[in-house]
Amino acid sequence: MNPLIEAMSETVEDLYGHVYRVSSFATQVGRAVGLGDDDLDRLTTVGVLHDVGKIHVDPKILAKPGPLVGEELRRIRRHPEYGFAMTIDAYDRAIAEAILHHHERWDGNGYPFGLRRTEIPILARIVLVADAFDAITSHRSYQPALSVEHAIGELRTHSGTQFDPDIADAFVGMIEAGEVAPIEAIAPISV
């Protein structure tokens, strides 16, 4: 087992489900938007490791049932930077940069740097959409799982603000066309 995945198992809620679903969803949408094989391989790895920096965040913050505030929010928002530091020497730079930027928003209101639009690496833009979809449709300490229809509505609502509209539209189209692999069919991915 990858030592980073093993370390994550102590801190990331539903680790084995979440990271593999994000990786699978991201790779499927990456293929749909025309990424080449090398970027698809990178995207698979980014999906699995996007939350690796959370191993440096207090587990009480990660498991908090309500909204994060103040110092809690500041700490959780550091996880992309921690993940970048943990992966930059072990993986391709594009992988580490996608981990660093997977919470940047299309409108520039994301973190850690407030990048916007195409300043954000495409791998990070894709993982953001896949991660949001999985967060909405999975049980979390702060919310019950919501429906796929609700998630589609959120992706549409935030397309062009939080999400790259081309990526959000492609993913929604794939879901509606039944082209996204069912969650139950997603198997662990080796990175």
Image (cartoon, rainbow, N blue to C red):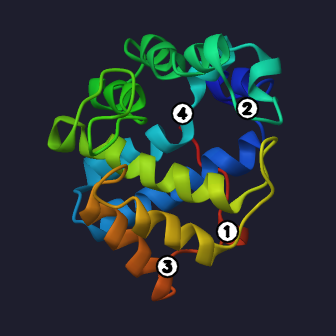
Q: Residue furthest front?
A: 70
Q: In this rendering, would 100 be left or right of 55?
A: left
Q: Residue furthest left?
A: 118
Q: Residues within 10 Å of mark 2 (few under 14, many from 20)?
A: many
Q: Residues within 10 Å of mark 4 (few under 14, many from 20)?
A: many
Please report contact status of discs 1 and 2: CB closer than 8 Å, yes or no.
no
Helix, strand or loop at label 2? It is loop
> The disc labelled 2 sits on which kind of residue?
Val
* x, y percent for residue 137: 68, 62
Indicate which disc, 3 or 1, sits on the residue closer to the N terminus: 3
Question: From mark 1 to mark 2, how far is it between C-alphas?
Answer: 18 Å
Task: Identify which residue, 125 or 76, lies in the foreground.
Answer: 76
Q: Residues within 10 Å of mark 1 (few under 14, many from 20)?
A: few
Question: From mark 3 to mark 1, how far is it between C-alphas?
Answer: 12 Å
Question: From mark 4 to mark 2, how far is it between C-alphas?
Answer: 11 Å
Q: Is residue 191 above or below residue 148?
A: above
* x, y percent for residue 54: 63, 22
* x, y percent for residue 166: 25, 65
Q: Which residue is under mark 4?
A: 49
Which residue is at 73% across, 57% downward? 138
Q: Which residue is under mark 3?
A: 175
Question: From mark 3 to mark 4, how far is it between C-alphas?
Answer: 24 Å
Question: From mark 4 to mark 1, how far is it between C-alphas?
Answer: 19 Å
Indicate which disc, 4 or 2, sits on the residue closer to the N terminus: 2
Helix, strand or loop at label 4? It is helix
Mark number, residue 12: 2
**Which of pointers 3 and 1 indicates the residue nearer the eye?**
3
> The disc labelled 3 sits on which kind of residue?
Ile
Helix, strand or loop at label 1? It is helix
Q: Which residue is under mark 1?
A: 183
